[in-house]
Image: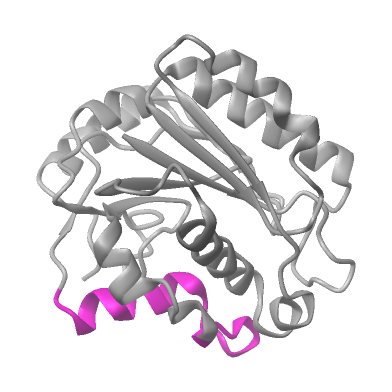
Amino acid sequence: MLAIITGTIRPSQKMKQLVLRDENERFKQYEEGLRFLLESRAFSKVIFCENSGFGAEKLSCLIDMVSGKDMKLELLSFQGDVEKACTHGKGYGEGEIMKYVFSHSRLILGEPFFVKMTGRLKVDNIGKMVKHLDPENTYFNIPNRTKRDIYDTRIYGMPCAQFKKLFMDIYTQVMDEQGIFLESVYTQVIRDNKINITNFPYYPRITGVSGSGGSVYGYTEWKCKIRDIFSKVNAYRVK
């Protein structure tokens, strides 16, 4: 199964709503997140793509981690449209990354399904989650049980053909200052096309720090076990 990991190592100083701007610290967190994911061996293919033109050379040592382990790692870096990302918001840059991956990646060729994850975060139970995914389904969760009007884009999964047809170019509608975030744009696509959403089979145990708001993500295991039950009956869907 394929994972797409998105990132921005060297964000523009013009970009609003960013707490962590230090590129060295951001690089460290991306590297740690990738190491964690590769060590989990949850995916046979991993694509990491970042849109600040930082380059992938410093991460090339990670390719040695997958050598001889029936895994493949592809590292992509390009310079996104800084002016448009600053005008539209972070979700625009995320959309640029996904489009770049689908247009330039070698590993994605012929793949029927992918899981997308935000690069600086870790999903502690990702291996368990992936084992139970159906590549014909579309997987999203809501951000939390009190926010049920949008889907979470930190982690989601869907067929590649569906993403290319319905989601790949929609990021141009993002306008953060008007309250039109990538999450709300994706949610509208889901509604308009009546896409049946399945929750991940186990509730994602996400840890890490949000680069935009600086929020620290964590979880309590016993609460997550309860959420696992609700996930199995698709309780974490937009109302």
The image quadrant that residue 130 belongs to is top left
Q: Is residue 146 left or right of residue 23?
A: left
Question: What percent of the width, then of the height, locates residue 214?
Answer: 71, 51
Question: What percent of the width, then of the height, locates residue 216?
Answer: 64, 41
Q: Is residue 113 left or right of residue 172?
A: left
The image quadrant that residue 121 belongs to is top right
Q: Residue at x 25, y 66 (%)?
A: 162
Q: Is residue 141 left or right of residue 19?
A: left
Q: Residue at x 32, y 55 (%)?
A: 145
Extreme residue toward the left, this view: 233
| Magenta-drawn stretch, dominant element (helix, strand or loop) | helix
Q: Residue at x 53, y 68 (%)?
A: 95
Closest to the observer, 150 or 194: 194
How many marks can you see? 0
The stretch of residues the image draws in magenta is: 173-194
Q: Residue at x 75, y 78 (%)?
A: 86
The answer to whether residue 192 is magenta is yes
The answer to whether residue 180 is magenta is yes
Q: Quadrant of the C terminus?
A: bottom left
